[in-house]
Amino acid sequence: MKGRFFPWRWLAVFTLICSVALVSVGPAAAETVTSYKTNWVEGFTSDSELDQMRAAVENYITNEGDLKGLAANLMLGFGGYQEYYDNRAAFLVHFIGRTNPEEGFSVSPVRGVKGQISFGKLPDGYHVVNTVAFQLRRETSPERWVVEACYRNQPNFSRIGFMTNARDGGPIVCSTLVDPKLFARTAVLTDGPTGFTVKVPYENVQRAAFIRLQQISTGELAGLTTAGVAPLRAVRVTTNPEQRDSSVIFTAPFIVRFEATGLTEPNLGYWDANRHKWVQVAATVETEEAANGQKRYVTAEVRYPGEFALFPAPIGEPVEDPGVPPSPFDSLDLIKGIRIDDKAVNIGAAKPFIRDGRVMVPVRLVSEALGCKVNWEPVEEKVDLYRGDRQVIFWVNQKRVITNGPWIAVDVPAQFVGNHVVVPLRFLAQGLGFEVSWDARNRIVDIKTGK
């Protein structure tokens, strides 16, 4: 059909069809749904575009009060019908609760063919709390997907899935929201088929973030042996894709573990993307009593998300802190240091550097050393700095600065380096009333506060 075709009307028809197919469970008994059967929807997209849609839905959930509360549950999200003429799509999210489950959550594999599919049976202890449908619209400037409508309490017909360009069913992704404002809670995601569990205490993240868990297929693992040992099972742990540096989300380690019952020498591997190989993670092997006998687990504390695999034998020397990303500052023209009133500033991983003849500094590093208050406005990407009666305002990628009144032009704007905002030091310091000088021989900046 050509011309305008609003996909939600089509979705309503599909809902009716699925309600008839699921007459034994029906919307009224949503909390007791244990299995799903439905048909493919004729909609094609790419995996990257599906990720963009998922990110738009996650952003909407994060900023919508009642949905954010639901997001503490396990979530399964699935793309729906995409109408290219109207640039709209549908996306479903199932919020799945737990009641003392005895096993990890698991869904049956999705077959990459048109026709009937099944997600299998929910394990004992899991139930559907709510099913929410989102209507998305594609925008072109900037190019992105946005949520324009949200429909709660939908029937649990589960999947109206995209057929991706590769003609597979799209990845099965479980996720949950971790929010540091909700103390004394721990997010737990478990993948039944792989026996993998990730546990993230809420206080171990510095801002609200979605933690995702996805099984890695045997096809992806083929040929990825290390030290002659092939991985048995593997999963991918990720966070919001829009985060510039997902590693800075975590302020403390989180726990990952594989069930390894039956293995005499289980080991945990982490995929090192820089070296293109698995590295062995420093882990412990534990035995726990279960209803059907003893179970073994290989467990580790890690600081970074990534790809984890279970190995039946050692693959090398254990690495204590796998996944440490290379610093985006290492490739820059770094300076040796900063002195404030002849005292060296302690510089961490975010280092000052020279760009286009200007010394650029991580705004929090220097502002805190100078006793400033810092306010970050994410929508405008604006940094406000206050000290006494003085104020300096920077905008990321804009060549203007406000210093105690009118704005002035700058030749090098504030900008992101990784997840850090850096600003031209001279404009910052002079705007706050300090004197700045450059020791070219030693590549050190001197700041005099006049104290």
Image: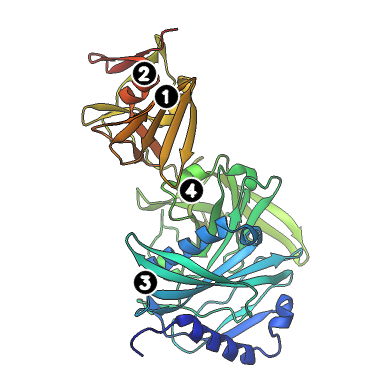
Mark 1 and mark 2 lie on one chain; the one further toward the N terminus is 2
User: In the image, which is nearer the foreground, mark 3 or mark 4?
Assistant: 3
405 and 336: which is toward the camera:
405
User: In the image, which is nearer the foreground, mark 2 or mark 4?
Assistant: 2
Q: Residues within 10 Å of mark 3 (few under 14, many from 20)?
A: some
User: In the image, which is nearer the foreground, mark 1 or mark 2?
Assistant: 1
CA separation, marks 1 and 2?
A: 9 Å
Q: Which residue is mark 2?
A: 338
Colour scheme:
rainbow
| Element carrying mark 3 | loop
Q: Residues within 10 Å of mark 2 (few under 14, many from 20)?
A: many
User: In the image, which is nearer the foreground, mark 4 or mark 1?
Assistant: 1
| Element carrying mark 1 | helix
Please identify the quadrant where the N terminus is shown.
bottom left
Residue 434 appears in the picture as rendered? yes
Measuring 65% from the left and 60% from the top, which residue is drawn there? 66
CA separation, marks 3 and 1?
A: 43 Å
| Element carrying mark 4 | strand
Q: Which residue is mark 1?
A: 366
Mark 2 and mark 3 lie on one chain; the one further toward the N terminus is 3
Residue 269: where, in percent of width, then height?
49, 52
Give me the disc on residue 280.
4
- Extreme residue in the front direction: 406
Residue 222 appears in the picture as rendered? no
Q: Which residue is mark 3?
A: 46
CA separation, marks 3 and 4?
A: 33 Å
